[in-house]
Amino acid sequence: MTTRIESSLLIWLYFPPCVGHDGLMKKLLGNSITLFVTILIGLLNNPYAMATEEPKFSLIEKSGDFELRLYKPMIVAETYVDGSLSEASSAGFRLIAGYIFGGNKSRQGSSPEKIAMTAPVTLEQSPQKIAMTAPVVVESKDNRWRVHFVMPAEYTLTSLPIPNDSRVSLREIAEQKTAVIVFSGVAVENKVKDKTAALFDWIKSKGLDATSTPQLARYNPPWTLPFWRRNEILINIK
């Protein structure tokens, strides 16, 4: 019922029933109202417009778009997917969303459990770990990504439900210091590369050392207007 009402409202605004000599002004007014209503509907239907839990951290330093944060320990549900940034985002999101929306088995043996959505969705290009030798070698494997959601703080590894899909796993991450650059707009690959390079330069200027591959964090659903989107590149440092 809600969808029908919204659709009828938008159609009426785009095609006013009465257009006289001042039809142009009415059309312009109608289009302006349409934009406002579209934005309002997006906000009302956007789960991120309400309080969405995010990973806990302490802010150590802030300089423009750059920040140093100390993240508290967290638990993530993660998966590894192949493809481009866009393909990995979509495939990884579907796999983990399936887990948190009921694709799991409760440890109490009851019905599947729904887990609250958190923000952000995080992607990281995955290195490939080689079997233990001397020395230990870690090399990048092209077009393979790790995608994870941070689990709500109320859970522990022993209380989270078990994923039905073996491609989804749970992992605890220790406290870590992280350098971050915050930016808005659509996080397309060229923009991500530019922001990543800027963050590496900032880390170097602070005399810090990177200890992880860059991670892309997206906080908003895809229908969010670009200037309202919040994206971050995160690199763990020491």
Image (tube, rainbow, N blue to C red):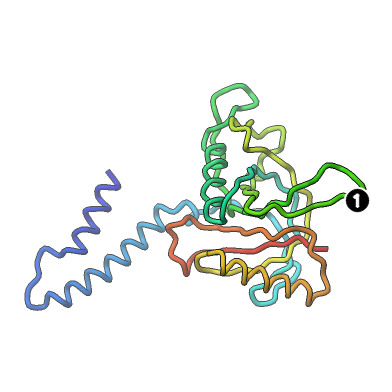
Image position of 200 (left or right of 35): right
Q: Residue furthest top?
A: 109
Residue that carries the numbered disc 1 in the rendered image: 135
Give the image quarter of residue 67: bottom right
Q: Is residue 25 above or below residue 171?
A: below
Q: Name the residue nearer the viewer: 56 or 195.
A: 195
x and y, in percent, of residue 60 in the image: 76, 67
Image position of 203 (left or right of 38): right
Give the image quarter of residue 100: top right
Q: Secondary structure at mark 1?
A: loop
Please state the total of marks drawn on the protein image: 1
Quarter containing the N terminus: top left
Q: Residue at x 65, y 34 (%)?
A: 160
Q: Residue furthest left?
A: 20
Q: Residue at x 57, y 46 (%)?
A: 92
Q: Residue at x 52, y 43 (%)?
A: 94
Q: Amino acid at mark 1?
A: Pro
Q: Is residue 36 above or below residue 153?
A: below
Q: Residue at x 48, y 66 (%)?
A: 228
Q: Name the residue nearer the viewer: 84 or 111.
A: 84
